[in-house]
Image: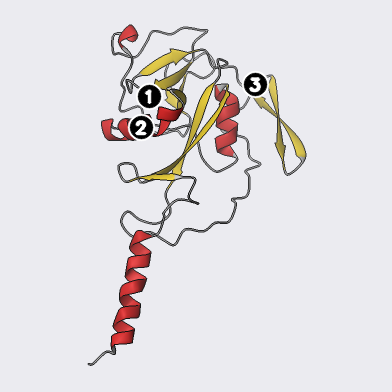
């Protein structure tokens, strides 16, 4: 079977475009091949809950970190912010650390002030931040402001990316799983204020 040069050139261009396409929603997100996820830094400093809401409206969460490579990638992305929230926290009265995206706790890199191990329960410090200089995690009060990085799955399978779209994702109106109890938070979504109840961190 004989193919024309134009057809072969068109096929080659299609393959190159497919492989080199950004697997993230747009150019403001950075792709990590280690986790096959997309990340976006927000330098505005907020508390943990506000940062998680900011991510949830984009179908994302604070980053959950499961390997040294992923930790290094997030640390490098956070360099402009110095310290950022990560998605691990102790919810309600639980003394266990849980990732906000429900992934398993299978990696840790706590700061030396915590003896490089998971810190003891501290009612006033139930969230965690990542120090971008050292790449280590620190226990923190959830209300002390820090920058936010949002993390979401990349589009398409590894190494075979779909063409990235530039459409704005529809904001989620579903409260994140960790919202419950007797406290409320007002969230604006398309000029409509919604009240959510959430558990104390």
Q: How many marks?
A: 3
N-terminal of the pair, mark 3 or mark 1, is 1
Few, some or many C-alpha atoms within 10 Å of disc 2 (few <14, some 14-19, many ≥20)? some
Q: Which residue lies furthest to the left in this view?
A: 1
Left or right of residue 72, residue 23 in this image: right
Q: Do the residues labelled 3 and 1 touch (CB within 8 Å)?
A: no
On screen, residue 128 above or below 172: above
Q: Which residue lies furthest to the front in this view?
A: 80
Q: Residue 164: x percent and y percent?
A: 47, 58
Residue at 63 percent of width and 40 percent of height: 174
Q: Are marks 2 and 3 in contact (CB under 8 Å)?
A: no
Residue at 49 percent of width and 14 percent of height: 126
Q: Are marks 1 and 2 in contact (CB under 8 Å)?
A: yes
Left or right of residue 46, residue 22 in this image: left
Dot 2 corresponds to which residue? 76
Dot 3 corresponds to which residue? 181
On screen, residue 123 above or below 88: above
Dot 1 corresponds to which residue? 132
Q: Residue 192: x percent and y percent?
A: 77, 40
Residue at 56 percent of width and 19 percent of height: 145
Left or right of residue 92, residue 189 in this image: right
């Amino acid at each position: 079977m004989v193919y024309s040069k134009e057809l072969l050139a068109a096929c080659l261009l299609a393959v190159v475009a497919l492989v080199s396409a950004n697997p993230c929603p747009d150019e403001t997100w950075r792709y990590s091949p280690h986790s096959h996820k997309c990340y976006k830094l927000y330098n505005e400093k907020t508390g943990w809950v506000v940062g998680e809401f900011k991510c949830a409206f984009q179908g994302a969460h604070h980053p959950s970190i499961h390997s040294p490579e992923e930790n290094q990638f997030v640390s490098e992305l956070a360099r402009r912010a110095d310290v950022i929230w990560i998605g691990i926290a102790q919810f309600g009265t639980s003394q266990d650390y849980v990732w906000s995206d429900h992934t398993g706790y299978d990696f840790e890199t706590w700061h030396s002030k915590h003896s490089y191990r998971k810190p003891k329960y501290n009612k006033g410090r139930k969230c965690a931040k990542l120090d971008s200089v050292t790449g280590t995690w620190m226990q923190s009060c959830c209300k002390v402001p820090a920058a936010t990085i949002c993390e979401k799955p990349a589009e398409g399978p590894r190494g075979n990316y779909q063409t990235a779209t530039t459409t704005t994702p529809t904001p989620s109106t579903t409260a994140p799983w960790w919202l419950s109890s007797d406290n409320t938070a007002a969230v604006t979504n398309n000029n409509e204020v919604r009240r959510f109840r959430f558990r104390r961190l």
